[in-house]
Amino acid sequence: MRTHPPSHPQVLAFDVFGTVVDWHSGIAREVQALRPAVDGDAFALAWRAGYQPAMRRVMAGELGWTLIDDLHRLILDTLLARFGLADLTEAEKKHLNKAWHRLDPWPDVVAGLTRLKTRFTICTLSNGNIGLLTNMARHGGLPWDCILSAEVFRAYKPDPATYLGVARVFDVAPCEVMLVAAHQDDLAAARACGLQTAYIERPAEFGAAHPKDLTPDPANTRHAQDFLALADQLGC
């Protein structure tokens, strides 16, 4: 049994959707701006629920390599009639699909990343495509040193190529990379590749009406309430 944390990593790689940005509130707000009568909570949950099945179609070979922007549009098109949005114009559909580029960070994120950046290299490790992540960073003032994406590795998380790819990009050992995420399955896959892991509590990721189970997993290297608490733990 580990009695103390391993030495600090050199690179912190961050999951983005849910960990860095509040996708639920952002998507609900954007669809209600277009159509106030739409149940924004239900719409946001339904759009996000299509994410894993869509990626599985790519991983199974049913679809060729597909950017998340394009997967988001495929999912959106299946939801429009269900939510009374079938009459949206093409321009409105494109604008709504780009809502994922305009998501706001959680309140602790910019200050927390700024502190963590003083000691560590900080980068994204997201299934989002590079254009999406770049626009999101500009929108939210996210001070990344580097944007890494499934697009770089042509593999979606939890493929080992993504986690090990971070170590390869920065020429460090996997144990010198820490994945920071609000999702235990993502962290478990990273640990299986030899990465350190930090769980971040995001109780309202799925909306205030759907609180998450935040039970700590002792297998994680760190467990923190938010990025500021993680910075405290890591001495930043």
Image: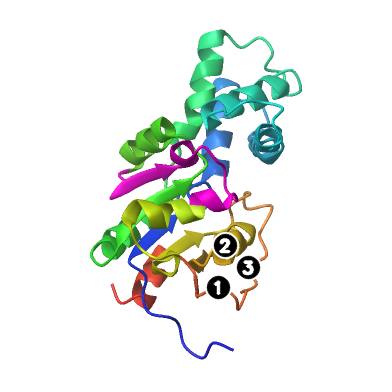
- Mark 1 and mark 2 in contact? Answer it, CB < 8 Å: yes
- Given residues 108 and 10, the one toward you in this image is 10
Image coordinates for residue 149, horizontal then vertical, percent: 45, 42
Q: Secondary structure at mark 3?
A: loop
Amino acid type, label 2: Leu
Image coordinates for residue 55, horizontal then vertical, percent: 65, 36
Judge the density around disc 1: few (<14), some (14-19), many (≥20) Cα neighbours within 10 Å: some
Is 223 left, or right, of 135 in this rendering? right
Calculate the distance from the C-alpha at mark 1 to the C-alpha at mark 2: 8 Å
First of labels 2, 3 by sequence position: 2
Calculate the distance from the C-alpha at mark 2 to the C-alpha at mark 3: 14 Å
Magenta residue span: 141-162
Tell me what residue is drawn at x 40 percent, y 45 percent.
Answer: 148
Tell me what residue is drawn at x 59 percent, y 89 percent.
Answer: 1
| One can see residue 37 in this view | no
Question: Which label was assigned to residue 54?
Answer: none
Q: Secondary structure at mark 1?
A: loop
Calculate the distance from the C-alpha at mark 1 to the C-alpha at mark 3: 13 Å
Q: Determine which quarter of the picture holds residue 187.
A: bottom right
Per the image, the residue denoted by label 2 is: 187
Farthest residue to the right: give it. 82
Per the image, the residue denoted by label 1 is: 220
